[in-house]
């Protein structure tokens, strides 16, 4: 399913994971408030570049912390409001955020299942999965991408030991900025 970066045109869609892609992922914990949220400096440089390349940019993020009662939907909304405000300030854009708070790993909306991609297509009918890329830092993100028919880009921010080449990974980069520069 590999693709060339030259295939990307302004109609393509970018799916981004959040923790470990846009912001620092907390080891064995959750980002539960805006005070705990820390952008990767590279992501704030990358997001304006990506906004110029993709028609639609969405975040798909598993948020088990809500299901476990460690935070609320309101806490998550506060994080996302502040995150989007900061991304907009630097010239980037996020068109929508889809999240799954379910605890069950087989929930249809929890990555690696494709439910959040289907939600995105329902809200943005112009999305063509064959012209979409999933960028994430875990193999569950890559399986999500494959399960939805998306191309995949793995960022080695938190799991650099992940094997590459890999049947579920089209491209691998150190961080979101390296990906943005490559395309």
Image (cartoon, rainbow, N blue to C red):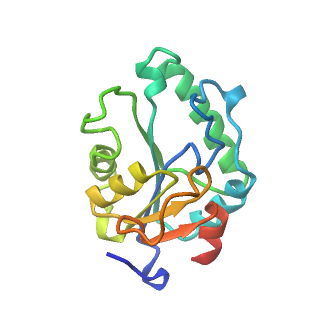
Report the residue that reaches farthest toward the top.
Answer: 69
Residue 145 visible from this viewpoint: yes
Residue 136 picture location, percent across and down: 49, 54
Residue 74 picture location, percent across and down: 52, 20
Residue located 25% across and 35% down the image: 106
Residue 98 picture location, percent across and down: 41, 40
Count of all numbered marks drawn on residues in the image: 0
The front one of 161 and 38 is: 161
Residue 128 visible from this viewpoint: no
Residue located 59% across and 24% down the image: 32
Vertical relation: 26 (above or below) 56: above
Vertical relation: 148 (above or below) 98: below
Q: Quadrant of the C terminus?
A: bottom right
Residue located 50% across and 58% down the image: 162
Q: Quadrant of the N terminus?
A: bottom left
The front one of 142 and 55 is: 142
Direction from residue 17 to residue 31 in the image, left or right: right
Residue located 64% across and 60% down the image: 175
Direction from residue 48 to residue 3 in the image, left or right: left
Residue 119 picture location, percent across and down: 30, 45
């Amino acid at each position: 399913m590999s693709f060339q970066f030259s295939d990307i045109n302004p109609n393509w869609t970018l799916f981004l994971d959040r923790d470990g892609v846009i912001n620092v992922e907390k080891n064995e914990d959750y980002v539960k408030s805006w005070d705990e949220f820390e952008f990767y400096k590279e992501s704030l440089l990358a997001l304006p570049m990506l906004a110029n390349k993709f028609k639609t940019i969405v975040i798909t993020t598993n948020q088990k912390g809500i299901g476990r009662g460690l935070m609320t939907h309101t806490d998550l909304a506060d994080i996302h409001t502040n995150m989007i405000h900061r991304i907009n300030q630097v010239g980037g854009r996020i068109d929508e955020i889809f999240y799954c708070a379910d605890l069950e790993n087989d929930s249809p909306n929890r990555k690696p299942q494709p439910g959040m991609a289907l939600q995105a297509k329902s809200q943005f009918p112009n999305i063509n999965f064959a012209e979409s890329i999933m960028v994430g830092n875990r193999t569950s993100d890559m399986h999500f991408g494959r399960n939805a028919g998306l191309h995949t880009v793995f960022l080695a921010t938190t799991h650099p030991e992940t094997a590459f080449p890999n049947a579920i990974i089209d491209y691998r980069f150190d961080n979101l900025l390296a990906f943005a520069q490559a395309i």
